[in-house]
Amino acid sequence: DAKTTQPNSMESNEEEPVHLPCNHSTISGTDYIHWYRQLPSQGPEYVIHGLTSNVNNRMASLAIAEDRKSSTLILHRATLRDAAVYYCILLNSGGSNYKLTFGKGTLLTVNP
Amino acid sequence: GAGVSQSPSNKVTEKGKDVELRCDPISGHTALYWYRQSLGQGLEFLIYFQGNSAPDKSGLPSDRFSAERTGGSVSTLTIQRTQQEDSAVYLCASSFWNQALDGYTFGSGTRLTVV
C-alpha cells in the first residue's frame, strides 16, 4: 500500500492560514488523496479529497503537486475549532486499497 | 437521518457479558466499516461490508468479535464474553460504492467500558 508521511505536530495562530503537508512518493495513478481530521473526543470527519487538480470546498483547499508525490491541506483562516489531528490517506479507486488506514497524522494546535 | 447513527452512545458492561453495538449508515451507502479506537491510540480497522460481497473480516481481533449487516443497511457488531481490553470507542463509517471518489462518513461512536 502507498504510504503517507506527515509531520507529527504543527502550531498556528487563530485567523492565520495553515498549510499542512503530506508526502506520498509511492502514490499510484489511481490513488486519491484524502484528508480527514479528528477533533478531541469525536469520530473522524472527512475534510477533502482530490486526484490531480487542486480542490476547494467550504472547509479547506487541497493543493496537489504536479508529480502528485506531495500535497498540502490549506486552512485559510484557522479557528480554535480547527485544532485536531489531521490525517492524509490514499484510497485507490480501482479497489486495491479501500481501507482508511490511519497513521499518526499531524496534531494541529491553534493558539488564540 | 442525514448522518451515520450509532447506538448506544455509551455502554458499560461487566466482564464476560456479551454486547451488541448498532450502526445505521447513510441511506444509499453500500459500504460500511467498523473501527475501534482505544484511549490515546489510533484507529484500528475491524471489518468492512460492501453490498452483497463477502465481508472483509481481516481486522477482527479475535473470534469473540462478529458483525453482520442485514438487508444491506443496518449493521450490528457483537462482542462475546467481553474483556477489559475491549474497552474502546467503536466507530462505524459508511460510504458510496467507490469510497475513493466520495470519502467516508463516520458516526459519533459507541464508548464501551468493560468493568
Image: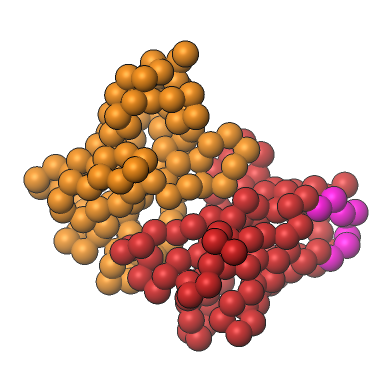
Chain colours: A orange, B red
* Relative to A53, residue B55 above or below: below
Is A75 on the left-hand or right-hand side of B49? left
Q: Is residue B11 left or right of residue A92?
A: right
The answer to whether residue B46 of the structure is visible from this angle is: no
What residue span does the magenta drawing correspond to? B11-18
- In the image, residue B26 sits, relative to residue B113, either above or below, namely below
Q: Residue at x 25, y 53 (%)?
A: A50
Is B13 magenta? The answer is yes
Which quarter of the rendered picture does the N terminus of chain A lie within?
bottom left
For image coordinates 66% across by 39% down, the residue present is: B39
Residue B91 sits inside the magenta stretch:
no
Tell me the chief SS of the magenta region. loop
Give A9 or A12, whichever is nearer the viewer: A12
Q: Position of residue A20 (x, y in %)?
A: 31, 32
Task: Say left or right for A44 vs A99.
Answer: right
Left or right of B24, for residue B51? left
Q: Residue at x 9, y 45 (%)?
A: A66
